[in-house]
Amino acid sequence: MAIKKQAIVCHSGGMDSSICLALAIREFGAENVLSMSFSYGQRHSIELTQSAKICQAWQVDHVVLNVGCLQEITESALIGSKLAIKHEAGQVAPTTLVVGRNGLMGRLAAIHADHIGANCIYMGVIEVESASSGYRDCSRAYMDLLQEILRIDLDNSQFEIRTPVVGMTKCETMEVAAELGILEFLLMETVTCYRGILHAGCNDCAACHLRNQGSREFLHAHSDFIMPYQLPN
């Protein structure tokens, strides 16, 4: 028999989804939250390692769902390493876009949530990535549409997709992490870089640019905070 939970968090091992996990724990308690990560043939597996490490530290149950078929039906620089990681000006979408990934993960998490008695899932999508990186599945509008379909699928008009950081800047997400008392831990343990490099990352990909810029803005507002690693110039 499945262990009952109150919330599932789609957990990538990154800063935003880890903040979502912390918020879910604060509301429901660690014992009532499930972290769900996905193995989909991603370019680097360190995100799964870090997800597990964070969950162990916070005493949260963690599962990894295998959706390796993604690499058989689509192509992205984040699946395998055949495509280069790049986002050129005027480009319709970056090579790092995995078409339909957030929708697929949200749907799978929702199906399991229904099975274990949870009435909501959390997703760490953030619209700044939709605006700056071309990720069209990172908006609240997208999640509202998905939520509407899931309520039909699950026959549950109260089912929620919670996206607590969706309208924030990266600096604002760090403010939330600081208020929760977990910012330094997340800066050290989460992975944002598309190349799988911890901390300041490669400082070349779009994800690193957003995180490092957010870190600089946070430091400017909080001069007493000491970064646990050196930011690139």
Image (cartoon, rainbow, N blue to C red):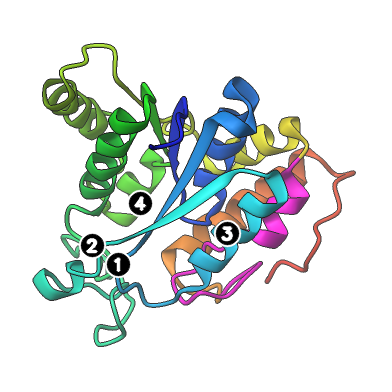
Residue 200 location (% of width, % of height): 64, 68
Amino acid type at circle 2 is Val
Name the residue located 40 percent from the left edge and 43 percent from the top edge: 128
SS type, badge 2: loop
Label 4, residues with CA under 10 Å away: few <14, some 14-19, many ≥20: few
- CB within 8 Å, label 1 to label 2: yes
**Residue occupied by mark 2:** 98
Q: Nearer the viewer, mark 3 or mark 2?
A: 3
Q: Earlier in the sequence, mark 1 or mark 3?
A: 1
Residue 140: assigned label: none
Q: Nearer the viewer, residue 94 or 76?
A: 76
SS type, badge 4: helix
Range of the magenta residues? 182-201
Mark 1–mark 2 distance (CA, rounded to whole Å): 10 Å
**Residue occupied by mark 3:** 52
Asked if the stretch drawn in magenta spans residue 3, the answer is no
Q: Earlier in the sequence, mark 4 or mark 2?
A: 2
Q: Earlier in the sequence, mark 3 or mark 2?
A: 3
Amino acid type at circle 4 is Ser
Q: Nearer the viewer, residue 169 or 197?
A: 197
**Residue occupied by mark 1:** 40
Mark 4–mark 2 distance (CA, rounded to whole Å): 16 Å
Label 1, residues with CA under 10 Å away: few <14, some 14-19, many ≥20: some
Mark 1–mark 4 distance (CA, rounded to whole Å): 24 Å
Q: Nearer the viewer, mark 3 or mark 4?
A: 3
Mark 3–mark 2 distance (CA, rounded to whole Å): 23 Å
Task: Identify whether 168 is placed above or below 208.
Answer: above
Residue 132: assigned label: 4
Task: Identify whether 29 is placed above or below 13.
Answer: above
Name the residue located 12 percent from the left edge and 70 percent from the top edge: 74
Residue 80 location (% of width, % of height): 30, 81
- CB within 8 Å, label 4 to label 2: no
